[in-house]
Amino acid sequence: MKVGIEAIAFHCPEHYIELADLAKARGVDPDKYTKGLGQVRMAVATPMEDTVTLAVNAALKALENFDIDPKDIGTLVVGTESGVDHSKPVAVYVHEALGLRSNCQTYETKHACFGAMAAVSSAQDWISCGRARGSKALIVASDIARYGVGDPGEPTQGAGAVAMVISDTPNLLYFDSEISGYYTKHVMDFWRPLYSKTAFVDGPYSIDCYLNALDGALADALAKATIPALYKLDQLQACIYHVPFAKMAAKAHHRHFEIDAGEKIDKESERCADVRKSFAQKTGPWLSLNAVVGNIYTGSVFLSLIDLLRSNTSANLRQISMFSYGSGCAASMNIAYPTPGFERFKDQINPEPALTARRKLSIDEYDNIMKISDSLGTGNTEAFSAGDWDLTGDFLYLGNKDHIRRYSGL
Ligand code: HMG
């Protein structure tokens, strides 16, 4: 049985900042953000958006754009690390907003950015083992990435949600049932304790942890393969990775290339030209959405997947690798096959029109939003009402106002 992605959709906040503006405001050379990190813009969630509103909007688009009956959804999972409640899952708000059936199993998953990939993997198993009985799984990756204002992590924030319907009629892509490599290790690279709204991170160490996890997950995948040669880089037309910032995917591909070639490749060496060429063919072109949205944590690898699928056809895309990483840390390496004819859904999945319609914020407006967001939940209603946000904007689903007020205690 082929199990994979039948529908996919992305929802992004309607506001963004230019990273060159942020760099200037923070006294940093803009090239550091745009070239050094590879990021151009960053999505900014207003105080009227949270992981519920983002998730609901993405899920609605996935169902509507692919004409999927909500009654067919038998499992709903939201992967997030920026949920709205320690006990009540984001998924149950989504369940209500979409009007899903009551015999739908509904829950939230968490392991930093790996949470949604873990849910996709469970959904595959649920369908493959026959327990779905013809139903489909709706998996939503929804997050708002926050670091402290002025921290090195600040230009790597972002917000957005990707919703996917997983089924045995995968219109877009199906997963290799034989190959999935895993890696887990307790590390303190990035974490957000219950009392903090922003993440704590040891940036350079988090990059090392990510790359070590890539080594581990790829080695596990290849060890499980009956014919490992089928998963060599020259057999893959695309390699996508978790993308906290675009440059990280370049580092990841460099490591992937080294493992594949069985040799260390110095950045200054002539051999590195081959790495750059491989990156330019297999990874670089599918980072354009991530570069204008930022880190959306659980959804980042799937945003790159959307970019890949909207830009290719079955003629040039037959086999790809997908690496998911969540700090703390857990990772997986999957092999997947784009379904022949997937290109007929290009218009449904292309988020370009919504991204183009976004409104640019000044850095003063962004700073104000960060202040208001930080004060939410602490009873600071004055700060909240001082924000002149359009409470009825299209980006809000019906009932959002109530939901926000309910959980933020306003
Ligand atoms: P930093 O210390 O500000 O930056 O932190 P840097 O000094 O390392 O510079 C970054 C790059 O810009 C370097 O390039 C510089 O050379 C270059 P590289 O050596 O890496 O190729 N650079 C310039 N380039 C052009 N012109 C210039 C210039 N100046 C410098 N003028 C860091 C960067 C990523 C560490 C920081 O932003 C951070 O802490 N981010 C958050 C953590 C993160 O994203 N980690 C990634 C791996 S962990 C992960 O992916 C999981 C995560 O998504 C969370 C989860 O799982 O939930 C984060």
Image: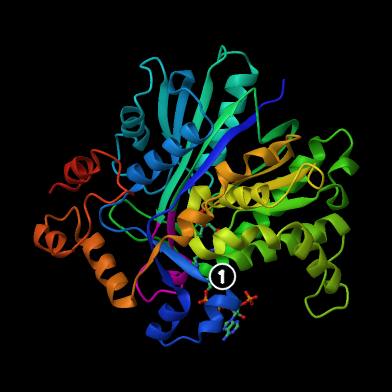
**Span colored in magenta:** 145-159
List x then y, in percent, for residue 97.
32, 31
Above or below, 167 relative to 230: above
> Residue 59's quadrant in the figure?
top left
The residue at the far left in this view is 382
Residue 283, position in %: x, y?
71, 58
Mark 1 CB in 8 Å range of ligand 1? Answer: yes
258 in relation to 233, above or below: below
The color scheme shown is: rainbow
- Which residue is found at the position 42% from the left and 85% from the top? 24
Asked which quadrant contains residue 76, the reply is top left
Q: Secondary structure at mark 1?
A: helix
Image quadrant in which you'd find residue 70: top left
Magenta segment includes 338: no
Q: Is residue 281 above or below residue 404?
A: below
Q: Circle 1 is placed at which residue position?
A: 204
Residue 171 percent location from the top left of the image: 65, 31
Q: Name the residue located 47 percent from the left edge and 61 percent from the top edge.
A: 356
Looking at numbered disc 1 in the image, what kind of residue is underneath it?
Pro
Asked whether 124 or 258 is in front, the reply is: 124
- Few, some or many residues within 10 Å of mark 1 (<14, 14–19, 20+): few
State the quadrant of the N terminus: top right
